[in-house]
Image (cartoon, rainbow, N blue to C red):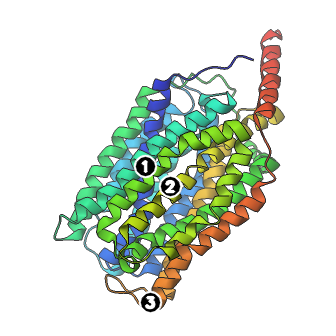
Amino acid sequence: MATREVPIRTKLLFGVGDAAISIKNTATNLFLLFFYADVLGAPPHWIGIAIFVGKLWDAVIDPLMGYISDNTRSSWGRRRPYLLVSAIPMAICFYLLFSPPVLSPGGTVVYLAVMGIVLFTFFSIFSTPYLAWGAELARDYHERTEVVQIRSLMGVIGGAIGAVVPVEIVKQFPNPRMGYAFVAMILASLIAVGGMTTAIGVTDPPSRQRVSTGFHHFVGGLRQTFTNRQFGIVFGTFCLMTMSAAMGQAVQLLVIKYRLGLYESFPMIAAVFALSFAGSFPLWQGLSRRLGKHRALLCGLLLGCIAPFGWIIVQPGNLPMMLAFMVVGGMLTGSITLAASAAADIVEMDELHTGEKRAGAYFGIWTLGLKSASAFGTLLGGFLLTAVGYAADQTQSEQTMWWLVLIVGPLQALVHAIGFLVFRNIKLEATDIKRIQAELDARRAALVETPS
């Protein structure tokens, strides 16, 4: 069976959109709680609630956004119009989130919640059609992994910018608040440019699919999505892992600053992690071709049961040891690209069963779960900071620091172990995808030949 090959230029231009997403995600995940708690001095548990509200709203509207883009008919395609209208507003809201007016602690929290809702609304309009579009770019089993990895490579670049730039620039300002506002302006510009590059540079074929209207069809589609057992296993596992990771990211910078004493070296730490993550792509692609996505991903999850204990092993002030730990962590994190590729395979299996192209519905559900899990993780992170006695911008007690180390270390290892045990039930390899695509091609050919 012949498969369409996606030009490298298209893969690269499409991937730039993920750089915009990663700048936004990395900056908010790493610095939002830190900025509002450690710089602005707002209560951590209320910050956690405010971030939770925005992320949960983002998660709730994702399935609806997926449904809308699935059923869009335009000469610009199904996905592209939404990127065009949301990229610039998303960037503006990102800037406003990190440059709040001077308010009381309560007013600051309210501002965070409201601005978060607006930002995440535009983010959902952009990201859900974008992810669904990515699942439709390639049909070949291994080329899908290449599309995901090029997109992820661009995401690594965006993530590195979102992680490195804030600390490097803020430390040049005597007032951290002003520094973060300046950083937000730079990152917002990059988000706008990255989003518009994909929206303008990648062609989305005009949609000819019949539009299915009505809330009944929408709800039925969501219910049908969850009847796909393979998708349910992937979905549940990565929701759990995302919640745990969000808790870790919420406190990770505090561990680096207050326990390890390496805050000034954070740009180097983040860059080493990003380079290791990107450098691992050929390794995971090779393992995927040799062992299959399922077994290769299991290898990554198994190693992930061990690596997080590096947060305990690394000693305060030991930058070389921390960098070595980041090399290992970045390489293991690269295995996550296999999961995104596997999700695209599952979408095609769903088309065989339902007769509908529903990538938007699937990735709406996917982002609903992952963003809800991330919201709960950040919420828990904020409450845990209060519970373990965190005090803003001052030396933390030894007991407080060990609680935070448990969150970024052993807890992450435990969740990877759960993921490994659950993910063993997923088995969808290259031969299965070729069979599914052959049946889909035969069905489409029959529809073309049938007189109207």
Q: Which residue is mark 3?
A: 398
User: Which residue is at the front of the view, 157 or 316?
Assistant: 316
The first of marks 1 and 3 along the sequence is: 1
Badge 2 density bin: few <14, some 14–19, many ≥20, Cα 10 Å:
many
User: Horizontal placement of 258 versus 50: left or right?
Assistant: left
User: Horizontal placement of 217 versus 395: left or right?
Assistant: right
Q: Residue at x 40, y 61 (%)?
A: 115
Residue 275 is tagged as 1
Q: CA distance from mark 2 to mark 3?
A: 28 Å
Image: 325 above or below 423? below
Q: Position of residue 173 (x, y in %)?
A: 17, 66
> Can residue 126 be seen in this snapshot?
no
Label 2 sits on a secondary structure element that is helix
The first of marks 2 and 1 along the sequence is: 1
User: Horizontal placement of 292 versus 363: left or right?
Assistant: right
Q: Quadrant of the C terminus?
A: top right
Badge 1 density bin: few <14, some 14–19, many ≥20, Cα 10 Å:
some
Q: CA distance from mark 2 to mark 1?
A: 8 Å
In the rendered image, the residue lying farthest to the left is 174
Residue type marked 1: Leu
Badge 3 density bin: few <14, some 14–19, many ≥20, Cα 10 Å:
few
Residue type marked 3: Glu
Image quarter for residue 174? bottom left
The first of marks 2 and 3 along the sequence is: 2
Image quarter for residue 94? bottom left
Q: Are marks 2 and 3 in contact (CB under 8 Å)?
A: no
Label 1 sits on a secondary structure element that is helix
Q: Residue at x 51, y 87 (%)?
A: 387
Q: Which residue is mark 2?
A: 330
Image: 18 above or below 261? above
